Image (cartoon, rainbow, N blue to C red):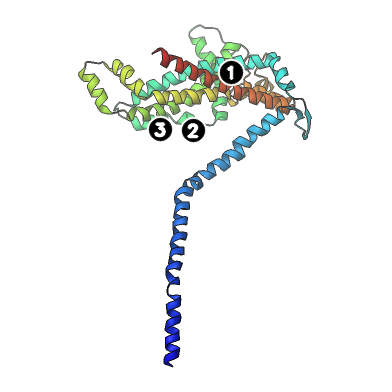
Amino acid sequence: MATSISKAQAGEGRRGPSRPDGDGAVRRRGALLHRLDVKGAPYAFVAPFFVVFAAFSFYPLVYTSWISLHRVELATLDVMEWVAFDNYVDLWNDSRFWNATANTITIGVISTVPQLLMALGLAHLLNYRMRGSLFFRIASLVPYATSVGAAALVFTMLFERDFGMINWTLGLVGLDPVDWEADKWPAQAAISTIVIWRWTGYNALLYLAAMQAIPADRYEAAAIDGASRWRQFTNVTVPGIRSTIVFTIVLSTIGATQLFGEPLIFGQGPNGVTGGADNQYQTLGLLLYEEGWKNYQMGRSATVAWAMFLLLVLVFVTQRLIKRLRSRTS
């Protein structure tokens, strides 16, 4: 019996050293999991974004570039004829493309510049303590919350030639009625008015948030130096929100390039797709839609989409070059 006990104790002694090895394996496994958690958790958190981006942005971009190199019709998307860069050459020689590009630029300019200036002034007013400021801040978001269809439909009725309120107001002051839809510049001004109404309040709140982040001691120092309200605005407020201004310019440029809903509804029918009877307000977005869903040429439509993308790239590269030249000269 003593012998068996001693053997059991000896066996326990032989198994005893294996416990530290087991604990070490557990610790190594825990350390490995900890490293994976620390290094892999950030990638796991951002993975959903990249999955969504790959599915809804990167893949359509690549597939659109592939389609643009083929002759494809809307009814037979599975039948593709390789044409290489013929679609791009045809688009380059198409007067409608250059007309749509010019219209996109002009509408973008006459809608973006007043919009951002008005938003900056509105944000400056809302930045001061005033009675009912919360109401005005919420009210400024109402146009942004309104659907583009509803906004464009209402403004189309306002700019109607025979019974619109705008022409009625012009008649009160003795001016002749304007055919807002048939003439080029009145049509582009009317479409720009819709864009300005929808996005001014949104940009104003962005500017307001940036203004409220400016330290108050800067304004106090400017006031002590005798700076007026206008000098404080130009020398303190504007430099303090310069990054936000650049951000809104970028957003407005992208939005102007992709302008589609406002001119489409403003046309009130078949003319909406072509941007009027003479393409007087046809944008690149409308040209893309006309080629793909009216002429059934998806290859040419994809080419227009890539032209819009390259136009944005050209604008941003030009902006960066101008910024670098200014920094060198200064």
Image quarter where the C terminus lies is top left
Q: Position of residue 329 (x, y in %)?
A: 41, 12
Instruction: For marks 2 and 3, give the CA distance.
Output: 11 Å
- Which numbered disc flags the more N-terminal residue, 2 or 3? 3
Q: Label 3 to label 1, Cα distance in Å?
A: 31 Å
Q: Within the image, what quadrant is residue 207 found in? A: top left
Tell me where residue 212 appears, x and y as whole percent: 33, 29
**Residue depicted at 69% across the width and 26% down the height:** 301
- Identity, as a three-letter code, of the amino acid under mark 2: Ala
Residue at image mark 1? 104
The label number, if any, that marks residue 218 in the structure image: none
Residue ID for mark 2: 145
Amino acid beneath label 3: Ile
Q: Position of residue 63 (x, y in %)?
A: 68, 34
Which residue extends farthest bottom? 1
Q: Using residue 88 as the reference point, say whether residue 312 is left or right of it.
A: left
Circle nearer the viewer, 1 or 2: 1
Q: Mark 3 against mark 1, which lies toward the viewer? A: 1
Secondary element at image label 2: helix
Residue marked by disc 3: 138
Is the C-beta separation of discs 2 and 3 under 8 Å?
no
Q: Secondary structure at mark 3?
A: helix
| Label 1 SS | helix
Outermost residue, left direction? 224
